[in-house]
Structure formats: C-alpha cells, structure tokens
Amino acid sequence: MWRGLRSALSRLCGPPAAPRAGMERAVVRCVPSEPKLSLRLVLPDGSARHMQRDQAEPLGRALARIATNAAKGRAKAAKKSKKARAEGGPAGEADGAVLQIGEAQYRVERNPPALTELRLPRSLLAGFPVCPKVSAEFAAPQHCLFRWYRERRPAAGGGEEAAEGDGGPAWVEAAAAERVFTPSNALVGLRLKLRCTPGDGAQRYGPPREVESSGPVEAGPGACTFDSRHLYTRKVCGEGAVRAVSYNILADTYAQTEFSRTVLYPYCAPYALELDYRQNLLKKELAGYSADLVCLQEVDKCVFVDSLAPALDAFGLEGLFKIKEKQHEGLATFYRRDKFSLLSQHDIAFSEALLSDPLHKELCDKLAKYPLVQEKVLQRSSVLQVSVLQSTSDPSRKICVANTHLYWHPKGGNIRLIQIAVALSHIKHVTCDLYPGIPVIFCGDFNSTPSSGTYSFISSGGIAEDHEDWVSNGEEERCNMPLSHPFKLLSACGEPAYTNYVGGFHGCLDYIFIDKNALEVEQVIPLPSHEEVTTHQALPSVSHPSDHIALVCDLKWK
C-alpha cells in the first residue's frame, strides 16, 4: 500500500531538492487494519488540517483531492501553479518525500513514532525506582529516549540555586538517559520532570513530550523487609535455571476498606495502606528479585495496567492478566522476555469450567449430590491462570506456569478441594493432551496450611472420601468423594512457619509447587526474619507492602 502512496505523492512533489531546514511535517497515518488513511498538516496561515480517505480509494486520486481541498481559498493562479507541480516531478522517496501545496512544502512522514501516553507515578520516594507509564504508537519504550530533570533548589538565604545566565532554567538535568530513575535522598523536596522522545527500531524519532511529577520526592521508609533478600538475587539466573516468585500483593480494593483499617490492620499507619505508597515498595521489591517468572495474586486491574506492567516491562518482564469474575482484582503472571516466549494461554474460571467443560463432568456429577456445597462452589469467582512458555535458548524446553488464588474462608476446606481438583484436571489437559510431557510450576495463594486436605491432595496425588476437610463447614455441607491427580508435585520452598502474618493470624498459605520429575530446587531465598516481620507488629507495614510474604526460589532443569 505504501508503494502506491509513495507513487501518488511523487506526482504531488516538486522537483528533487534537499528539504529546507524547518520544513513543516505532513504526517500520514496508514494502518492496514483501519478503514481510513489520514494526513495531518498545518497550512501557512496556521490552520491545522486533518484529512481522511477510504483506503480502498485509489491513492493518486485521493491525494490529488486532498491537495486541492487543502489549497481552497487561494487564488486561481496559485491553484494552477500547484496543479502544474502536482502533475510533474520524479518519483519521491518514502519518508522524506516532499509534498507541495501552493508555495508551501511539507516533508512527508509515514507512521512516525508518537507517544499516546506519558505518566509518572503520583508518589515518589527517595531510593525507590520511578517507572513511567509509556504508551506509544509506531514506537516501543525500549527504543525511546529518556531525559530526567529535577527542580532547581532554592538556595540558602532566600536566593536560588546557581544557574548559567540570567534567569536560568527552572529544571536541571538529573540523571543518565535511562527509562527508570531512582531519586537519591538529595532530591527529597524537589519535583521531577521527564522528557521522552518516542523511537522505533529503525532509529526514527517522533516529537518529544514532557511530564512533570504532581508532587515532590519524599523520604523513603529506610530499611525494608526485602532488602536483605535482594542480596541473594542481584543477578538474573544463568541459562538452565529459573527464578520463580509467588506473591499475594494485597489488592487495594481490600486494603482501603474501613474494616481493613480498623479491624484487620489497625497497627498499620494509614499512609502505608495507601496504594501509591505500597506500589513504590512493591515495584522495588519485585525488580530486586531479578526473577524469570512472577506469579501475583490480588492484583487490581488498574494496578496491573498503570503500574506493574509498565514498571516490570522496564526490567524485561512481559505481563499477562486474568481478572476474577465480577471482581476488580485478579491474577498476573510475568515472564522474562529474553528467556521465554509465550506459546499459549489456557485461563479458566472454576465455576464456569465446572459447568461447561466436559473435562469436569464426572466431578460435576458427583458435586450435584451435594446441592449446598455445589451452590457455594458455583458462587465463587476464583480463577486459574495457565500459561505455556517456551525457552528462547532451547525451543525443546517448554513449561506450564499455573497461578491461582483459592477461596479464602477458614471453614472453606471442602470448597478449596473442589477448586483444586478442577485446577489440576485442567492443568493435566494442558500438559498431557495439548503439550504432552511438559513440566508444571504451580504458584499461588492456596489459603491452605500444610496440615490441610488441599495441601495433602496436591502433594500426595490423592485424598480419601473420609478426610476431615469434606466436613470443614459442618455436617450440613458434608461432601465425600475420593480425588486423585497424576502429578508428582513438591513445595519448592518447603513449609515455612508463615507466609501470611497479620494481627489475628499467621500461617503458611502460599506455595510454589514444582514437577519433581523435571525440576529441582537450586536455592530458596530466605524469608525475612521474624524480627523484620514484627518490627511494626505485623504486616502490612511502612516497610512491607502486603500482608503476605513473597516466596522466591531458583529452580533448574533435571
């Protein structure tokens, strides 16, 4: 299509000449999936023109009409002059062709890189990475140019920080040209500004855009619970090894309730429950793990889109999101782009799969005998995220990464058993039928302690119909059924004393289960010490962003 446009432009171009300095731009936006081609330019009188045509219309005719329409209102002689130029002239180049309308010349740019969104976080803390949200068209963040600035600091005695020349700039360049900037303590009290120039892989650059922070850099909290853990994870794992993280990050939709502030977390300073504050800690914590796989639970949709996905993208991680039914939060799985590529996704909602997928018909029929339990199971919004990844260095190595968050209620052991049975049947379908023989990493908040039926079922491969969890909510909701699965799964991080520590409860609820036939544990990153966890009584706190603790381990292929 662009060849046709280039040919048509050549008939509107003047004789070959080097484009004049300061020549105006004529931006052509030409996307095959869209019905219209557009041309934007500013006429000599200062009026902006935005013209469109159907992509099915012959390009020569369309551009001749565009040029004629753009020149309306000019003298007939000028029109004739333009027409004469439009009819003559040699073939133009692609980008850089010169379009002439009357006496005005325009340098044509086809699909130039352009920013559609540039945003800084609302909260900036010294010592914590500032990750801008960058959305672009015909560009990619990794090819954009970034320049960071800080405000000029008022000098002692009421004057201003010295600057070159009279009335020096209000902003001073603050850092190297990197996408992520970590402000130092010296910048506390000063606002930041980012100048971003969109670019693409062909080293074409579009018009820059600037954004200023809404507030100044504030002092950080000092030592955090994850600082000592980062000593073990400074570098990305080598080839043949995989660092995995599982973490319930505490959804804002739950943290910002009156019940949470007054009953669940009364010991936590109110500002430390604020989303913007917690996101600063969370982004630093996750970036510092240098992980290859990150499975998160309780991820607010807006947090994934506006905060985590842009931030972790800057650290080389690609993100996938699965929202819970009728909820504002869900699951997120991130994988390191230079280690893995995504082959396919197989996400499900447990209730929907149970009713509609033939895989679960036998279980569904058994459950139908217990209508009270069946109703509770079908009311739950829990989901399972399943991603099949392929190694970029060894395409024969594929892996199934599963991520879930099971029903939370302390008396819901029977519900969790049904949910995990659905999950393991679905994972079996993916790893035995769709991709025979590929290993599994199954992460999540299982809301199940090591003494529970759910943990026993996952670890041992079966559960008896008389297990006590079938009556976890009393005789009225009893449902007895034997269950089994074919996997040989091991809790990679063992059975820590706790992965969830709040005022009224502490226990191990989170796990990274691995296929012990194909994977082995190289190292488990130590959890924070009990002293670190309880420095501010419990979690979350000013130094820890969630009520759960991240599990981190290095795995290697057998």
Image (cartoon, grey):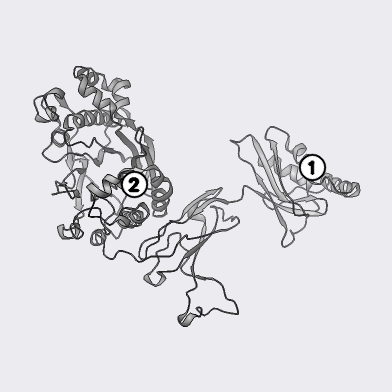
Identify the image quadrant of residue 233: bottom left
Which element carries disc 2, helix, strand or loop?
helix
Query: Which residue occupies the foreground of this view, 7 or 347?
Result: 347
Q: Are marks 2 and 1 in contact (CB under 8 Å)?
A: no
Q: Position of residue 275 (x, y in %)?
A: 36, 51
Residue shown at 49% from the left, 80% from the top = 158
Question: Comparing marks 2 and 1, which lies closer to the viewer?
Answer: 2
Residue 168 as seen in the image, left or right of residue 547? right
Residues packed near mark 2 inside 10 Å, few (<14), some (14 to 19) or many (20 plus): many
Which residue has dot 1 on it? 69
**Visible residue check, residue 244:** no
The N terminus: image quadrant: top right
3D distance between C-alphas at marks 2 and 1: 53 Å
Above/below status of 272 relative to 169: above
Asked whether residue 180 appears in the rendered view, the answer is yes
| Residue 260 image offset from top left, x and y in percent | 27, 47
What residue sits 28% from the left and 27% below the top?
Answer: 379
**Type of the residue with mark 1:** Asn
Q: Report the amino acid beneath label 2.
A: Asp
Where, by quadrant of the figure, is residue 299 drawn?
top left
**Residue 426 image-quadrant placement:** top left
Question: Residue at 16% across / 47% down in the picture?
Answer: 504
Label 1 residue SS: helix
The residue tagged 2 is 252
Residue 138 coordinates in the image, percent (x, y): 56, 48
In what quadrant of the picture does the C terminus appear? top left
